[in-house]
């Protein structure tokens, strides 16, 4: 097998191991969600074609190690039978990661649905200077670490106050992680500092009288995060995007920007540092 072929295979999710003809198969697991029937099939494949185990990657992926290349087409067919596909490696848009989103008590957006939609549109797209990772997290707790992705999406919430419902118990002020709320019980006043608020929604979901209410869900966008030898956290470029359509427009324009301004082999963060975050923001705004 030539070096060129190994590179081709890698871009389709087959990673060569040290042993002759042996590969680890990386699967496309969107948002870390796997059906039980898929797990059963994975177990069968690992037993039959691998060495009886799988590996869970740091980005919620599944790899089946120790598969001989001669068995690859058979394994691929068996995977397809339970709607599993190969992942992507190399200079491509990688499988989208996501947290539980609305299934979590803090979740503000439907992360799985968005992850599936984003993955459907962008997975495996190449032609950029380097790999491109997208992560979606349901709230500012940031469990999926959106700041470690080339583009990270975070659920946010805007709220409104219904004065007549408030009994000035003070719970929202106690619960707010950034001190954005002050409750003056004596004069029955609530002071809210919108600049401090990080849109976590904790006040809304903990208020016993429904005085804080959800006004709108939205999305914060981070860009330029990366790990590896020279890790950097992504920077927040949009605090509150109101619609999913606009999120998709931002991803489109971000990938266009990366393609146009990125140098060969450069991660998106390096492009941003060299070209400037302000120029990027102007292009995608
Ligand atoms: S980021 Fe928020 S919604 Fe997602 S798992 Fe963590 S706490 Fe739950
Ligand atoms: S938790 Fe609700 S009822 Fe209590 S002070 Fe805050 S807004 Fe008012
Ligand atoms: S949404 Fe979160 S950060 Fe904002 S005021 Fe409520 S608890 Fe505080």
Image (spheres, grey):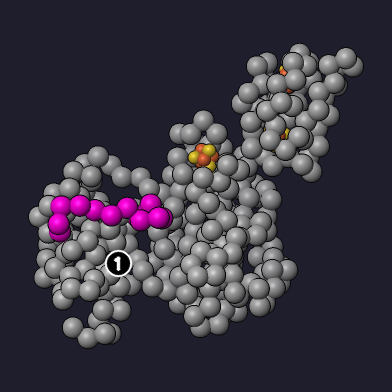
Q: Tell me: 182 left or right of 28.
A: right
Q: Quadrant of residue 13?
A: bottom left
Above or below 72: residue 58: above
Find residue 27 and report its horizontal and vertical position in percent.
29, 58
Q: Is mark 1 on a helix, strand or loop?
A: loop
Q: Position of residue 234 (x, y in %)?
A: 61, 60
- Category of crowding for the residue at label 1, using alpha-carbon neighbours closer than 10 angstroms: few (below 14), some (14–19), many (at least 20): many
Mostly what secondary structure, the magenta segment? loop
Which residue is rendered at x = 66% and y = 73% of the image?
273
Magenta stretch: give its range: 50-61
Which residue is the site of mark 1? 13
- Percent position (x, y) of residue 48? 9, 55
**Residue 143 lies within the magenta run:** no
Image location (x, y in percent) of residue 19: 18, 73
Q: Can residue 57 be seen in this view?
A: yes
Q: Is residue 53 left or right of residue 205?
A: left
Q: Is mark 1 within 8 Å of ligand 1?
A: no
């Amino acid at each position: 097998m030539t070096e060129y072929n190994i590179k081709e295979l890698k871009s389709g999710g087959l990673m060569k191991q040290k042993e002759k003809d042996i590969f680890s198969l990386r699967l496309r697991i969107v948002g870390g969600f796997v059906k039980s029937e898929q797990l059963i099939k994975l177990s069968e494949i690992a037993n039959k074609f691998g060495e009886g185990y799988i590996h869970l990657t740091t980005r919620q992926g599944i790899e089946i190690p120790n598969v001989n290349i001669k068995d690859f087409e058979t394994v691929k067919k068996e995977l397809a039978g339970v709607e599993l596909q190969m992942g992507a490696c190399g200079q491509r848009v990688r499988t989208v990661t996501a947290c539980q989103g609305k299934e979590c008590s803090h979740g503000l957006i439907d992360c799985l649905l968005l992850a599936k939609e984003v993955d459907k549109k962008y997975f495996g797209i190449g032609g950029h200077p380097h790999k491109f990772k997208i992560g979606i997290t349901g709230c500012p707790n940031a469990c999926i670490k959106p700041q470690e992705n080339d583009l990270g999406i975070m659920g946010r919430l805007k709220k409104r106050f219904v004065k007549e419902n408030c009994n000035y118990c003070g719970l929202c002020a106690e619960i707010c992680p950034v001190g954005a709320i002050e409750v003056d019980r004596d004069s029955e006043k609530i002071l809210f500092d919108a600049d401090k608020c990080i849109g976590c929604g904790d006040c809304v979901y903990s208020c016993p009288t429904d005085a804080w209410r959800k006004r709108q869900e939205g999305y914060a966008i981070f860009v330029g995060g990366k790990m590896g030898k020279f890790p950097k956290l992504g920077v927040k470029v949009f605090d509150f995007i109101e619609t999913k359509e606009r999120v998709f427009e931002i991803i489109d324009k971000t990938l266009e920007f990366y393609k146009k301004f990125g140098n060969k082999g450069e991660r998106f963060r390096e492009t941003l540092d060299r070209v400037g975050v302000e120029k990027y923001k102007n292009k995608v705004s």
